[in-house]
Amino acid sequence: MLLLPGPAAAIAYGVQDPRALAMGGATVAAATSAHAMLYNPALLAIYDERKERNGAQRFQFPIASVQTTDAAEALYELNRDDLDQRLTAAVATFNAAPTAANAGAVAVATRDLEDALIRIANKDLLVDGYVGLAIGVPGKREGGGFFAGSRLVGGGFANLSDADRALLDAYIDGMTYIATGGAQGSPQPGIFDAGGNLIDPTDSLTSMLNARGALISEMGVALAREFNLFDWPVALGIAPKAVHVQVYEYRQTVTDDLNTTSNGRREYDDFNLDVGATTALGGHYRLGIGIKDVLPRDYETALGGAVKLRPRVRAGIAHRSGNMQLAADLDLTRNAPVGFESATRELAVGAEWAATDWLQLRGGYRANLEASGGLVSLGAGVTVSGALLDLAYGHGRETRALALQFGVAF
């Protein structure tokens, strides 16, 4: 069954905390009481002692993670640095004083804008970030928890048209010709108007950005208990949650400022729930299955698109022996893109080694079976007098991820 593709869903299962990121996202059978409510609430019921004695109570705040692609970072930098406005200003300066130095400044500003557009064009624009808190209170074969947080997830796709590329190349060539006194470049009379003024090329750019995303804020409780089903111990968990969703959609030229564009935004208040199950096999193995957002939901944008929340099913296995834990997860559903990026169906593997009582070292790998490439990740957790600090970093061919959290054991 683990190898069979499931129905399409939208939005990836999610990696919200540094331990999960460091272990490649393998959490459904391996999450601890600190984060079970985020991945598989049934894991709150796997402890053998009462809460007064098991030492597994956790309060985590803040929990923060972010994953972006190189193209998404380039889009952010383009907007942050106002590269199109820099070019517009350079054109105005040249028209006021058409010197060689000002011509060179136009050429540089044009090249910076073109380079940024090349970094963005025809690549996945993906952002997946989370900030929240979690409280886990496991008892003897039962447990509970509370969680609250916001997840920003979005994807897009941008093109660089042949016409835009040719236009920017003409400005670079023509302005370089003037800046070097004809030593480099070539004359480009088409970039000037009838009065001899340099035309602002940013007014003629047609390359488009299509993007869609959602800010999903959740607050919920998690409840778990172990039952004997046909003399086999199985823990079941449920996490009902209130959900507030803001959806966004952008259809605009690439150089438009996202911060001032609100087209496509709508807000919704809703209810949903996550469920999970887990069971032990022998003394060292554990199986788990988690289902996020059991109730299907569609959230329409003002531009007619939709962000779809569908049940996302993930199965996992974990093996613990001494100070070492190994884990692997597999999505049983294909997660359709939120916007216009690639779909996801992830295979995650990870390991955690308790080097000492106060230091845990972790490593993992996550692959998207629907696209090429993967993410290698490393992380560590430190415990000092009940205070917890966890850090993780992930690196892929075109993807970066970072997560951190603080917590308290009580």
Image (cartoon, rainbow, N blue to C red):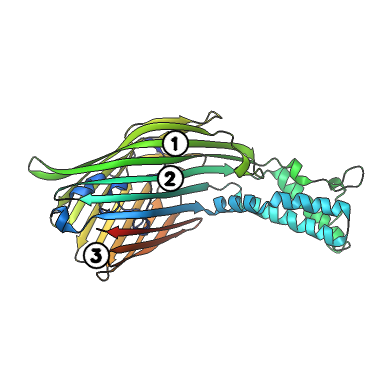
Residue at (71%, 48%) from the top-left corner? 165
Circle 2 SS class:
strand
Judging by the rendered image, the residue that carries numbered circle 2 is: 151
Residue 7 shown left or right of residue 183 in the figure: left
Res. 297 image quadrant: top left
Could you tell me the amino acid type at mark 1? Answer: Val
Q: Earlier in the sequence, mark 3 or mark 2?
A: 2
Judging by the rendered image, the residue that carries numbered circle 3 is: 324
Q: Position of residue 284 (x, y in %)?
A: 17, 58
Q: Position of residue 389 (x, y in %)?
A: 35, 63
Whether pointer 3 and pointer 1 mark residues with C-beta atoms closer than 8 Å, the reply is: no
Judging by the rendered image, the residue that carries numbered circle 1 is: 245
Asked whether 272 or 379 is in front, the reply is: 272
The N terminus, quarter of image: top left
Could you tell me the amino acid type at mark 2? Answer: Arg
Residue 209 shown left or right of residue 206 in the figure: left
Q: Earlier in the sequence, mark 2 or mark 1?
A: 2
Res. 102 image quadrant: bottom right
Residue farthest left in this picture: 231
Q: CA distance from mark 3 to mark 1?
A: 39 Å
